[in-house]
Each structure stands twice: as C-alpha cells, then as structure tokens.
Amino acid sequence: MTTISTRQPVYASPVDHVAYGHYGSGRLHLSPDWNRPLYPFQGRVTADGSSGLRAEPGRYHLYAAWVCPYAHRAAIVRKLKGLEDVVSLSYVDDERDGRGWAFRERRGPDPVNGFTLLEQAYDATEKGYGGHISVPVLWDRETGRIVSNHFPDITLDLATQFGQWATASIDLYPEALRPEINTLNAWIYHDVNAGVTRVAHAATERERERERHRVVAALERLDERLAERRYLTGDTITEADVRLWVTLARFDAEHNRGHLISERELPDFEHLWPYARDLHRLPAFRETTEGLPASWDTPPGWRR
C-alpha cells in the first residue's frame, strides 16, 4: 500500500502554455494508430471481489477535479452514499497545460502517492501510456494502479458495491428501476451532458444550430417530465439525477454564457429550476460544488 502523510507536500510547477502547450495534441486528439477506448482503464470493484477488486474500506482513492462535471458526479455519489471514510478523495488543480491535470497548492498535494502530475498515475499503471489523461480516476492503493478512468462505471460501483459501509437510506441504482435509469442515462449523456460540449465545439454555424436545438429540446422534455414527479424516476434520487444535475449546475455560468445554447436561462424553466435547487439543498450536491450564485440558495418551493 502506498500512502504518504508525513512528507513535505510536493507540487507541479505553474501552468506554462509556452513551455508545454495547451492540453490536447497527442492526448485528446489521438493519432490514427490509437485503437483503444478514450477511457481504457475499465476495472470494476465488486462487493464479493469476483472482479479481482474487492470493495474494502481504505483501499481506494478517487482523484477528481472541481471543474470537471464527470468527476463532480463521482464526488456527489461518494458523499450521498456516506463513503467519505471508506473511499478517500483529492482534487487536481483547476488549470492544465500540455502536461494534463496537476497537483498544485490551490487544491492541495496528492495525498496517496506524492505525484505532481496525474500523468504519473497513468504511467504507473501502464508504462509509456500515451492516451487521454482524464478525471475521475479510481486508484487502488493495494496494487498501486488505476482501477478505472471510465467515469460511467465509477459512480455505479460507488453506488452499489460498498453497501457494507454505505448509508442504506438512498439507493441510487435500484434493481427495479435500472432499465429506466439506463435509458435516461444514455439519453441525458448524449443530448445534455455531451450536447452542451458539442454546441461549444461546433465547426460550422449549421452544426451549432443543430446541436443547440437538440439540447434545448432535451431540457424542455426534462422540464415536462418533472412536472409530474420530484425526481427523474419518481420520489427518490437516482444515478440519473446526479448525471443531469452536474450539467444544470454549470448551464448558465458556463455552457449557456451569452445565450450560446438557449435564450432561456435555467430559472426560466418552470420545473427544472426548482428541481435543481431542491437537489442543491442536499449537502452531497451543495458541498461538492463551487461558484453557484445566491439564487441557488432560495427555497425551491413545494415539489412533488
């Protein structure tokens, strides 16, 4: 087991785009010879250890970033399930250059390995790894390797495989609702989570308009769905709510800045807005989020 606690904290040097360039080339924009998934480490943690990785307290560490919505949802699930003392968590710096995510004083050092760059965790797992360096990363202290950087699996494993130590008051992935949750997750990911990114990165105005209308239509459809239920699948929070919320929390300040996507801001949606504030009241959402305006703290009013 590799853990540092008494050493002097070590940090990466400041972001330097002149020396290292911007993140992307050779990482996000992979060469034609790269024939692996963008998120290639896809180990699964299981309660009984049948995957080779048993759920155990103190064994796993979550590397996250405050600015990354996909890492954000892992932090939310960890807190919703009461796993703060079971799976440890640390954050990389908000900014990155061509070296990728790094540990700097603003967010603190790497408490597990003393790495200065998250790239070192990838290289420790696969020597010479040349792919995308993403968060979240689930790290195994016992083997000194990455378990997974496949973000859809990480939250599911946190939600379902640590039941011995997790709070039983909330079931984010109940058996009876899994087909509905899976359908919602796939649609929300394509039309909302990834949809806002496609608008921002559209190469032509025609493409931007197509993707913009797709996102707006999805938000309107979700607004209608929430007219008749408190959460996306009914009266309890599920994985689908977590996946949607991280985009809603960034919609006005980031994705829709200057009405890039919609002339309507989130408060203009009759049901989405109180739904988003309702979730924000919960510590797992509120305490893992930074930078929301005071309007998010106003009471959402009665909801089903």
Image (cartoon, rainbow, N blue to C red):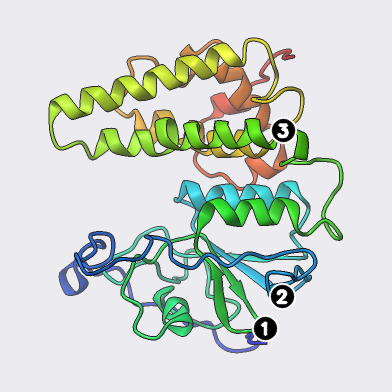
Real-space CA distance between mark 1 and mark 2, rounded to the nearest whole angstrom: 6 Å
Instruction: Tell me the amino acid under the disc marked 3.
Output: Leu
Q: Which residue is mark 2?
A: 59
Three-letter code, disc 1: Glu
Tag 2: Cα neighbours inside 10 Å, few (<14), some, or many (≥20)? Answer: some
Query: Is residue 260 at all visible to an observer of this figure?
Result: no
Of the two numbered discs 1 and 3 in the rendering, the one whose residue sits closer to the viewer = 3
In the rendering, which numbered label is found on residue 207?
A: none
Give the class, few, some or many, for how many residues have Cα within 10 Å of label 1's Cα (few <14, many ≥20): few
Residue 22 lies left or right of residue 186; in this view the side is left
Q: Amino acid at mark 2?
A: Arg
Disc 1 element: loop
Q: CA distance from mark 1 to mark 3?
A: 34 Å
The residue lying at 34 percent from left, 28 percent from top is 256
Q: Residue at x 44, y 73 (%)?
A: 118
Q: Is residue 169 left or right of residue 17?
A: right
Residue 139 % position (x, y): 59, 72
> Does the CB distance between marks 1 and 2 fall below 8 Å?
yes
> Mark 1 near mark 3, Cβ–Cβ under 8 Å?
no
Please name the residue that numbered disc 3 is placed on.
Answer: 177
Q: Give the mark nearest the N terminus, 1 or 2.
A: 2
Mark 3 or 2, closer to the camera? 3
